[in-house]
Amino acid sequence: MSTKDYSAKLLEMEGVRIENLEESEKEIVLQISLERRTQICRCCGAETERVHDYRIRQVRDLELRGKPLRLLYRRRRYACPVCGKRFAEKNAFVGRYMRFTHRTGEKIMSLLRRRSSMKDIAKDTGTSISGVQRVLKMAPVSKPQKLPEAIAFDEFKGNAGGELFQCIITDPQNRSVFDILPSRTVGTIQNYLRSFSNRIEVKY
C-alpha cells in the first residue's frame, strides 16, 4: 500500500495526501494536499493542469487519537490557458466558506438533534458557536413530508443513541441536508424510506 493510500485511509478522505504531521499536548496538525489532476475551467470548460499558486487553508476536523485535529490544506489554484480564469481545485471534504470539514458539520447536526447546547457542541467539535449556528440554519427542523426526486446517502462517525455511525440523507439537486438517521443499518434506512408515501417518485 502506498503512502497516499495510508493517508486516505487514516483521514477517510479520497485522494488526500499527508505531507507533514506535528503533534503537541493540545492538538494534532496535519498538512495535507490533494493529488494533482487535470481540472476543468468553470468559465469556459477548457482543460488545464497549469498551477497558478498554492494557498494554505486552515480547517478543523474531528478528533484524532483523542486530540483536536487541525488541517492545513495546501490548496492549488489553477490557471486556464484559454480564458485566463483562475480557480481553486475542487475537494470533497470542506465547503467554500466553511472552517471545518463536512463530517464535522454532520457531527454538529447529530448533536443538535440530541438538543445539546451550542456552547457544548462547539467545545466538543473544536469549532465556534457561530459555526454551530451556521450549521443549524442548514439543518432540517422536523421530519420532511415527502422524498425529493433525488436522494444521496453517506455515513459519518458520531455517538448518537449508542450507535458508532449515523446516516445522513441529502438532496443533491438542492444541495441541502434532507435528514439524519441515528443508525446506518439497512433496516433503519429501509423503514425510514417506507414511511414516505411518495417513495415511488424518487428517480435517482
Image (cartoon, rainbow, N blue to C red):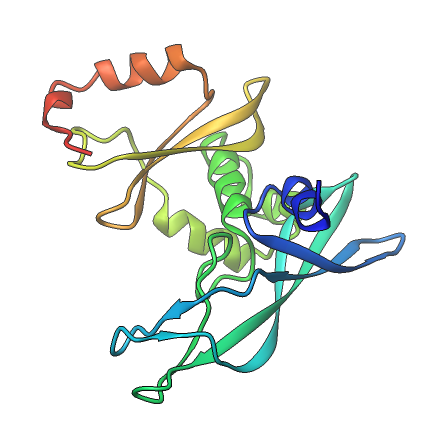
Nearer to me, 33 or 56: 33
28 up-or-down from 98: above or below:
above
The answer to which quarter of the image holds residue 70 is bottom right
State the residue lying farthest toward the right.
Answer: 25
How far across and down, in percent of the image, does residue 71 sit?
A: 67, 59
* Horizontal relation, residue 74 to residue 172: left or right: right
Residue at screen point 46% across, 68% down: 89
How far across and down, in percent of the image, does residue 31 sit?
A: 71, 62
* Horizontal relation, residue 176 to residue 130: left or right: left
The answer to which quarter of the image holds residue 160 is top right
* Horizontal relation, residue 121 to residue 186: left or right: right
52 up-or-down from 1: above or below:
below
Residue at screen point 54% across, 19% down: 161
How far across and down, in percent of the image, does residue 49 sit?
A: 46, 74
Number of callouts: 0
174 up-or-down from 116: above or below:
below
Nearer to me, 47 or 24: 47
Residue at screen point 44% across, 50% down: 135
160 up-or-down from 109: above or below:
above
State the residue lying farthest toward the bottom.
Answer: 84
How far across and down, in percent of the image, does residue 74 sit?
A: 62, 69
Quarter of the N terminus within the rendering: top right
Residue at screen point 27% across, 45% down: 172
